[in-house]
């Protein structure tokens, strides 16, 4: 019973591995979708708020509270 289970597991892995590695073996670049305008705006807000929090040297709960308020203002 154990050899049969082993063979079935090995066969499943052998079949699944090429499908999972598709694109990597041939050196193809993975295609990503361009971020939406809303996502870009959110990332820009995060960058600005993070920069401000860093200059104010905020850490822990005060930083979390500041970030929450900063992101809501924008």
Image: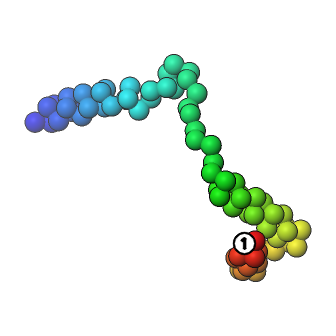
Q: Nearer the viewer, residue 60 or 34?
A: 34
Query: Who is closer to the viewer here, 48 or 17?
Result: 48
Pick whichever, 38 or 20, lies toward us: 38
* Left or right: 36 as drawn, with respect to 66: left
Location of residue 49 in the rendering, given as x and y in whole percent from the top left corner? 79, 67
Image position, residue 30 (x, y; %): 56, 32
Judged from this view, the residue extending furthest toward the front is: 37
Q: Residue at x 58, y 27 (%)?
A: 29
Lateral position of residue 25 relative to residue 43, left or right: left
Above/below status of 14 relative to 2: above
Q: How is the image coloured?
A: rainbow
Q: Please identify the residue farthest to the left as the structure is shown.
A: 1
| Mark 1 crowdedness (10 Å alpha carbons): few <14, some 14-19, many ≥20 | some
**Image spot of residue 43 (x, y percent):** 71, 58
Residue under numbered circle 1: 71
Above or below for 25 versus 51: above
What residue do we see at 41% from left, 32% from top? 20
Please state which of residues 17 and 43 is positioned toward the viewer in this rendering.
Answer: 43
Task: Find residue 42 and report its image quarter.
Answer: bottom right
| Placement of the N terminus among the 4 image quadrants | top left
Rendered location of residue 37, percent (x, y): 67, 53
Quarter of the view holding residue 45: bottom right
Image-quadrant location for residue 5: top left
Question: For the point 31% across and 26% down, which residue is it?
Answer: 14
Q: How many marks?
A: 1
Residue 9 visible here? yes
Residue shown at the point (62%, 43%) measured from the top left: 34
Q: Residue furthest right?
A: 55
Provide the secondary structure element on which disc 1 rests: helix
Which quarter of the figure is the C terminus placed in?
bottom right
């Amino acid at each position: 019973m154990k050899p049969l289970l082993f063979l079935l597991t090995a066969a499943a892995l052998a079949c699944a591995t090429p499908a999972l590695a598709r694109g990597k073996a041939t050196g193809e670049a993975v295609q990503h979708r361009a971020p939406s305008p809303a996502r870009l705006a959110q990332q820009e807000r995060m960058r600005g708020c993070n920069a401000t929090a860093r200059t104010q040297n905020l850490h822990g709960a005060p930083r979390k509270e500041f970030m929450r308020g900063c992101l809501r203002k924008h």
